[in-house]
Image (cartoon, rainbow, N blue to C red):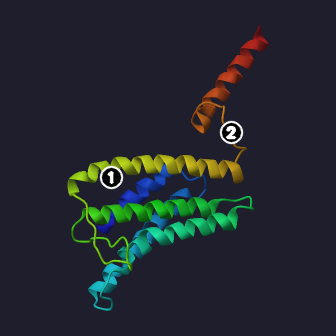
Amino acid sequence: MHPIIHIAVSILIGLGMGFHSKRKYLIVVLGALGVNGLLDLDYIIKGSGIMGLRYFHTGIGMLYIPILILIGSHLYERKKDTSIFTRMSVFVLIVALGHLVLDTFSGDTPVMLYYPITLQEYTFDPNLLPSAFVFFIGITAAANVLETYLYNNNEGMESLTAEEPGGNLTRRYRDRISHIKKTIDEIH
């Protein structure tokens, strides 16, 4: 698939995650460019004749290494008061997974998911592409909840208890309503 499509989808995923950082747009754009640029680097190298196999377009480059990066980031930050590397690793994993899925829909770049065990190449029927976008909307929403949870437990405010309905999504409105009720009680 064309690199512009990969980058555009990655930026949309990053914006949907809603990073809690002053530099969230920089993280999203550089992350989208960096991950997709690295994954497509093998295309450039293969085209120049240096390498015969697209090693980054395997399960190792697009799935297993990002999972190891996420695990390593979490283990590094689990006892610290920060979670930025873990949250960025979630973004890297979803972008790499998105790159993998989008490339399996284009017949010109099949993916070897189980390389080096097997060299079997995988492609999807392009008619299923809308289903993949719905899937990634769900993944992005789940990543948003996870990113907010990690931020709130480490850098942000205290995490909410499980019995609070709506969690972070309705907190502002509940706080505003309780403030209005308190103001009304003071008047009467």
In this rendered view, identify the residue nearer to me: 23 or 163.
163
Dot 2, crowdedness within 10 Å: few (<14), some or many (≥20)?
Answer: some
**Quick check: 81 left or right of 7?**
right
**Quick check: 8 left or right of 106?**
right
Which quadrant of the view contains residue 158?
A: top right
User: Looking at the image, which residue is at 27% across and 70% down?
Assistant: 110
Let me know if residue 155 appears in the view.
no
Q: Position of residue 111 (x, y in %)?
A: 31, 71
Q: Position of residue 97 (x, y in %)?
A: 41, 62
In this view, 41 is above or below 3: below
User: Looking at the image, which residue is at 69% across and 49% down?
Assistant: 153
Q: Mark 1 points at which residue?
A: 132
Q: Position of residue 95 (x, y in %)?
A: 43, 62
User: Looking at the image, which residue is at 56% across and 53% down?
Assistant: 19
Q: Please, what is the three-letter code of the amino acid marked with disc 2? A: Leu
User: Looking at the image, which residue is at 22% across and 58% down?
Assistant: 125
Q: Name the residue under label 2.
A: 160
Q: Where is residue 99 in the image (x, y as percent from the top left)?
A: 37, 64
Mark 1 lies on a secondary structure that is helix
Dot 1, crowdedness within 10 Å: few (<14), some or many (≥20)?
Answer: some
In this view, 161 is above or below 85: above
Mark 1 vs 2, N-terminal side: 1
Q: Residue 70 carries which label?
A: none
Q: Quadrant of the C terminus?
A: top right
Q: In which quarter of the image is the N terminus?
A: bottom left
Inter-mark Cα distance, 1 to 2: 32 Å
Q: Please, what is the three-letter code of the amino acid marked with disc 1? A: Ala
**Quick check: 33 left or right of 173?**
left
**Quick check: 60 left or right of 105?**
right
Mark 2 lies on a secondary structure that is loop
